Amino acid sequence: MLRTVLVDDEINALEALEWKLNRYIDTVEIISKCNTAAAAIQRIEKEKPDLVFLDIEMPEMDGFTLLKRLSYRDFDLIFTTAHDEFALKAIKVSAIDYLLKPIDKDELITAINKVNTARKGNQLEDKLESLFTSLSTNKLDKINISADGKIYLLEKNDVVMLKSDKSYTTLFLESGKEILVSKTLKEVEKKFDYPEFFRVHNSYLINMNHVKEFLRSMGGELIMSNGMSASISRNKKAELLDRLL
Protein backbone atom coordinates (compact mmCIF):
# COMPACT_ATOMS: atom_id res chain seq x y z
CA MET A 1 0.00 0.00 0.00
CA LEU A 2 1.18 3.49 -0.84
CA ARG A 3 0.94 5.65 2.28
CA THR A 4 -0.28 8.88 0.74
CA VAL A 5 -0.57 12.56 1.71
CA LEU A 6 -2.92 14.88 -0.22
CA VAL A 7 -2.10 18.60 -0.32
CA ASP A 8 -4.48 21.22 -1.74
CA ASP A 9 -5.75 24.52 -0.33
CA GLU A 10 -9.20 23.86 -1.83
CA ILE A 11 -11.26 21.59 0.43
CA ASN A 12 -13.51 20.51 -2.45
CA ALA A 13 -10.49 19.44 -4.49
CA LEU A 14 -9.11 17.46 -1.54
CA GLU A 15 -12.38 15.67 -1.01
CA ALA A 16 -12.82 14.94 -4.72
CA LEU A 17 -9.34 13.43 -4.97
CA GLU A 18 -9.87 11.41 -1.80
CA TRP A 19 -13.16 10.04 -3.15
CA LYS A 20 -11.61 9.01 -6.47
CA LEU A 21 -8.65 7.34 -4.80
CA ASN A 22 -10.92 5.40 -2.44
CA ARG A 23 -13.29 4.51 -5.25
CA TYR A 24 -10.88 3.46 -8.00
CA ILE A 25 -7.50 2.69 -6.41
CA ASP A 26 -6.87 -0.22 -4.05
CA THR A 27 -3.14 0.32 -3.57
CA VAL A 28 -3.36 3.69 -1.79
CA GLU A 29 -3.84 4.43 1.91
CA ILE A 30 -4.56 8.11 2.58
CA ILE A 31 -2.79 8.97 5.84
CA SER A 32 -3.27 12.74 5.77
CA LYS A 33 -5.09 15.54 3.97
CA CYS A 34 -3.64 19.05 4.24
CA ASN A 35 -5.16 22.32 3.04
CA THR A 36 -2.21 24.52 3.99
CA ALA A 37 1.42 24.30 2.99
CA ALA A 38 2.57 24.65 6.60
CA ALA A 39 0.46 21.69 7.69
CA ALA A 40 1.69 19.67 4.72
CA ILE A 41 5.34 20.23 5.61
CA GLN A 42 4.68 19.12 9.17
CA ARG A 43 2.76 16.00 8.15
CA ILE A 44 5.20 14.94 5.43
CA GLU A 45 8.19 15.30 7.76
CA LYS A 46 6.41 13.31 10.47
CA GLU A 47 4.59 10.64 8.45
CA LYS A 48 7.27 10.06 5.78
CA PRO A 49 4.75 9.01 3.11
CA ASP A 50 5.36 6.92 0.00
CA LEU A 51 3.38 9.25 -2.23
CA VAL A 52 2.36 12.92 -2.17
CA PHE A 53 -0.27 14.62 -4.33
CA LEU A 54 0.73 18.29 -4.32
CA ASP A 55 -1.23 21.26 -5.57
CA ILE A 56 1.03 23.76 -7.33
CA GLU A 57 -0.90 26.96 -6.66
CA MET A 58 -1.54 27.68 -2.96
CA PRO A 59 -1.89 31.08 -1.25
CA GLU A 60 0.79 31.06 1.47
CA MET A 61 3.44 29.29 -0.60
CA ASP A 62 3.31 27.40 -3.88
CA GLY A 63 4.08 23.71 -4.24
CA PHE A 64 7.61 24.36 -5.48
CA THR A 65 8.50 26.42 -2.40
CA LEU A 66 7.00 23.73 -0.18
CA LEU A 67 9.27 21.12 -1.75
CA LYS A 68 12.33 23.29 -1.23
CA ARG A 69 11.54 23.53 2.49
CA LEU A 70 11.23 19.79 3.01
CA SER A 71 14.12 17.84 4.49
CA TYR A 72 12.36 14.51 3.79
CA ARG A 73 11.91 13.86 0.07
CA ASP A 74 11.99 10.09 -0.23
CA PHE A 75 8.54 9.79 -1.78
CA ASP A 76 6.89 9.67 -5.18
CA LEU A 77 5.31 12.94 -6.26
CA ILE A 78 2.33 13.82 -8.41
CA PHE A 79 1.60 17.50 -8.98
CA THR A 80 -1.98 18.69 -9.43
CA THR A 81 -2.89 21.94 -11.19
CA ALA A 82 -5.99 23.65 -12.53
CA HIS A 83 -4.10 25.23 -15.42
CA ASP A 84 -2.66 23.47 -18.44
CA GLU A 85 0.26 25.86 -18.94
CA PHE A 86 1.44 27.02 -15.55
CA ALA A 87 4.96 25.66 -15.00
CA LEU A 88 4.14 22.49 -16.90
CA LYS A 89 7.09 22.87 -19.23
CA ALA A 90 9.48 22.70 -16.27
CA ILE A 91 7.57 19.78 -14.75
CA LYS A 92 7.76 17.84 -18.02
CA VAL A 93 11.49 18.45 -18.26
CA SER A 94 11.94 17.07 -14.74
CA ALA A 95 9.91 13.90 -15.56
CA ILE A 96 7.73 14.41 -12.48
CA ASP A 97 4.14 13.34 -13.09
CA TYR A 98 1.21 15.76 -12.95
CA LEU A 99 -2.57 15.71 -13.25
CA LEU A 100 -4.80 18.51 -14.51
CA LYS A 101 -7.86 19.46 -12.49
CA PRO A 102 -10.57 18.34 -12.52
CA ILE A 103 -8.69 15.08 -12.22
CA ASP A 104 -9.79 12.44 -14.69
CA LYS A 105 -10.36 8.94 -13.28
CA ASP A 106 -8.42 7.15 -16.02
CA GLU A 107 -5.48 9.57 -15.80
CA LEU A 108 -5.41 9.07 -12.03
CA ILE A 109 -5.30 5.30 -12.43
CA THR A 110 -2.49 5.61 -15.00
CA ALA A 111 -0.48 7.87 -12.68
CA ILE A 112 -0.82 5.45 -9.76
CA ASN A 113 0.15 2.51 -11.98
CA LYS A 114 3.31 4.39 -13.00
CA VAL A 115 4.14 4.98 -9.34
CA ASN A 116 3.64 1.31 -8.49
CA THR A 117 5.81 0.25 -11.41
CA ALA A 118 8.66 2.61 -10.60
CA ARG A 119 8.70 2.36 -6.78
CA LYS A 120 12.12 2.79 -5.15
CA GLY A 121 13.60 3.91 -8.41
CA ASN A 122 12.08 7.35 -8.54
CA GLN A 123 15.20 9.38 -7.58
CA LEU A 124 13.03 12.35 -6.63
CA GLU A 125 16.04 14.43 -5.56
CA ASP A 126 17.43 14.28 -9.10
CA LYS A 127 14.06 15.14 -10.57
CA LEU A 128 13.62 18.09 -8.20
CA GLU A 129 17.07 19.40 -9.06
CA SER A 130 16.08 19.29 -12.73
CA LEU A 131 12.75 20.97 -11.93
CA PHE A 132 14.24 23.83 -9.94
CA THR A 133 16.95 24.39 -12.55
CA SER A 134 14.35 24.49 -15.30
CA LEU A 135 12.13 26.86 -13.33
CA SER A 136 14.98 29.28 -12.66
CA THR A 137 16.20 29.08 -16.25
CA ASN A 138 12.85 29.50 -17.95
CA LYS A 139 11.08 31.75 -15.48
CA LEU A 140 10.24 35.09 -17.05
CA ASP A 141 9.53 36.77 -13.72
CA LYS A 142 5.84 36.41 -14.32
CA ILE A 143 3.44 36.70 -11.42
CA ASN A 144 0.75 34.02 -11.17
CA ILE A 145 -2.62 35.12 -9.84
CA SER A 146 -5.64 32.85 -9.35
CA ALA A 147 -9.01 34.45 -10.10
CA ASP A 148 -12.17 33.77 -12.08
CA GLY A 149 -11.33 30.07 -12.31
CA LYS A 150 -8.10 30.90 -14.14
CA ILE A 151 -4.44 31.47 -13.38
CA TYR A 152 -3.22 34.76 -14.84
CA LEU A 153 0.48 34.95 -15.70
CA LEU A 154 1.33 38.63 -15.49
CA GLU A 155 4.42 40.57 -16.43
CA LYS A 156 5.52 42.68 -13.46
CA ASN A 157 5.21 45.97 -15.30
CA ASP A 158 1.69 45.14 -16.50
CA VAL A 159 0.47 45.67 -12.92
CA VAL A 160 -0.04 49.34 -12.00
CA MET A 161 -1.35 48.88 -8.46
CA LEU A 162 -3.35 46.70 -6.09
CA LYS A 163 -6.15 47.95 -3.88
CA SER A 164 -7.59 46.22 -0.83
CA ASP A 165 -11.29 45.96 -0.08
CA LYS A 166 -11.53 43.97 3.16
CA SER A 167 -11.19 40.30 2.15
CA TYR A 168 -10.83 41.11 -1.57
CA THR A 169 -8.03 42.62 -3.64
CA THR A 170 -8.32 44.28 -7.04
CA LEU A 171 -5.37 44.32 -9.45
CA PHE A 172 -5.33 47.24 -11.86
CA LEU A 173 -3.42 46.47 -15.06
CA GLU A 174 -1.80 48.87 -17.51
CA SER A 175 -4.26 47.68 -20.18
CA GLY A 176 -7.16 48.92 -18.07
CA LYS A 177 -8.24 45.41 -17.12
CA GLU A 178 -9.13 44.77 -13.47
CA ILE A 179 -8.74 41.40 -11.75
CA LEU A 180 -10.68 40.77 -8.55
CA VAL A 181 -9.01 38.25 -6.24
CA SER A 182 -10.90 36.76 -3.30
CA LYS A 183 -7.92 37.14 -0.95
CA THR A 184 -6.68 39.89 1.32
CA LEU A 185 -3.96 42.24 0.13
CA LYS A 186 -1.68 40.76 2.77
CA GLU A 187 -2.05 37.34 1.13
CA VAL A 188 -1.70 38.59 -2.45
CA GLU A 189 1.26 40.83 -1.58
CA LYS A 190 3.48 37.76 -1.20
CA LYS A 191 3.31 37.32 -4.98
CA PHE A 192 4.80 40.79 -5.46
CA ASP A 193 8.07 40.43 -3.61
CA TYR A 194 9.98 42.53 -6.13
CA PRO A 195 11.82 45.87 -5.76
CA GLU A 196 9.30 47.58 -8.05
CA PHE A 197 6.41 47.06 -5.65
CA PHE A 198 5.92 49.04 -2.46
CA ARG A 199 3.15 48.93 0.14
CA VAL A 200 2.41 52.61 0.62
CA HIS A 201 -0.75 52.12 2.67
CA ASN A 202 -2.80 49.36 4.31
CA SER A 203 -5.06 49.52 1.26
CA TYR A 204 -2.52 50.08 -1.54
CA LEU A 205 0.42 48.23 -3.08
CA ILE A 206 1.87 50.18 -5.98
CA ASN A 207 4.31 49.59 -8.82
CA MET A 208 6.95 52.32 -8.48
CA ASN A 209 7.49 52.29 -12.25
CA HIS A 210 3.93 53.55 -12.71
CA VAL A 211 4.11 56.52 -10.31
CA LYS A 212 3.53 59.77 -12.24
CA GLU A 213 3.01 62.37 -9.51
CA PHE A 214 3.47 62.80 -5.79
CA LEU A 215 1.01 65.22 -4.18
CA ARG A 216 2.08 66.62 -0.82
CA SER A 217 -1.42 67.80 0.04
CA MET A 218 -3.93 65.69 1.94
CA GLY A 219 -1.17 63.93 3.85
CA GLY A 220 0.43 62.62 0.68
CA GLU A 221 -1.01 60.97 -2.40
CA LEU A 222 0.34 59.25 -5.51
CA ILE A 223 -1.07 59.61 -9.00
CA MET A 224 -0.45 56.49 -11.05
CA SER A 225 -0.03 56.06 -14.80
CA ASN A 226 -3.65 54.91 -15.17
CA GLY A 227 -4.93 58.10 -13.51
CA MET A 228 -5.82 56.41 -10.23
CA SER A 229 -4.61 57.74 -6.89
CA ALA A 230 -3.16 55.92 -3.89
CA SER A 231 -3.02 57.26 -0.35
CA ILE A 232 0.23 57.19 1.58
CA SER A 233 0.47 56.13 5.21
CA ARG A 234 2.31 58.57 7.48
CA ASN A 235 4.83 55.90 8.48
CA LYS A 236 5.57 55.07 4.84
CA LYS A 237 6.13 58.60 3.55
CA ALA A 238 9.83 58.92 4.42
CA GLU A 239 10.73 55.58 2.83
CA LEU A 240 8.66 56.39 -0.22
CA LEU A 241 10.39 59.75 -0.71
CA ASP A 242 13.79 58.05 -0.41
CA ARG A 243 12.80 55.71 -3.22
CA LEU A 244 11.27 58.39 -5.40
CA LEU A 245 13.99 61.03 -5.09
Image: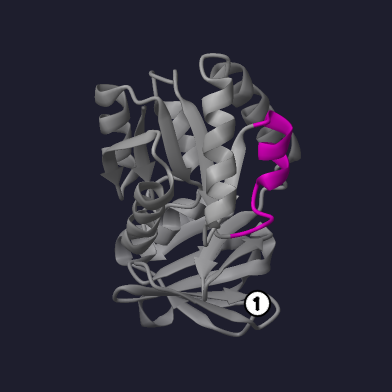
| Residue 10 seen from this side | yes
Q: Is residue 18 above or below residue 237?
A: above
Q: Amino acid at mark 1?
A: Ser
Residue 227: x and y in percent read 60, 85
Which residue shows up at 65% across the image and 46% down it? 87
For the record, the magenta segment spans: 83-95
Q: Is residue 239 left or right of residue 155?
A: left
Q: Is residue 22 left or right of residue 126?
A: left
Which residue shows up at 29% across the image and 45% down it? 34
Q: Quadrant of residue 223?
A: bottom right
Q: Was residue 106 drawn as part of the magenta stretch in this picture?
A: no
Residue 233: x and y in percent read 34, 67
Residue in the foreground of this view, choosing between 72 and 208: 72
| Residue 195 seen from this side | no
Judged from the image, the secondary structure of the residue bearing numbered disc 1 is loop
**Which quarter of the rendered picture does the N terminus lie within?**
top left
Which residue shows up at 36% across the image and 43% down it? 6
Q: Was residue 90 drawn as part of the magenta stretch in this picture?
A: yes
**Which quarter of the rendered picture does the C terminus lie within?**
bottom right
Disc 1 crowd rating (10 Å Cα; few below 14, some 14-19, many 20+) is some
Q: Is residue 207 above or below residue 216?
A: above
Q: How many callouts does the rendering have?
A: 1
Residue 120: x and y in percent read 51, 14
Specify the color scheme: one colour
Residue in the foreground of this view, choosing between 197 and 156: 156
The residue pinned by badge 1 equals 225
Q: Quadrant of residue 172?
A: bottom right
Residue in the foreground of this view, choosing between 178 and 130: 130
Residue in the foreground of this view, choosing between 109 and 150: 109
Q: Quadrant of residue 201?
A: bottom left
Residue 108: x and y in percent read 53, 47
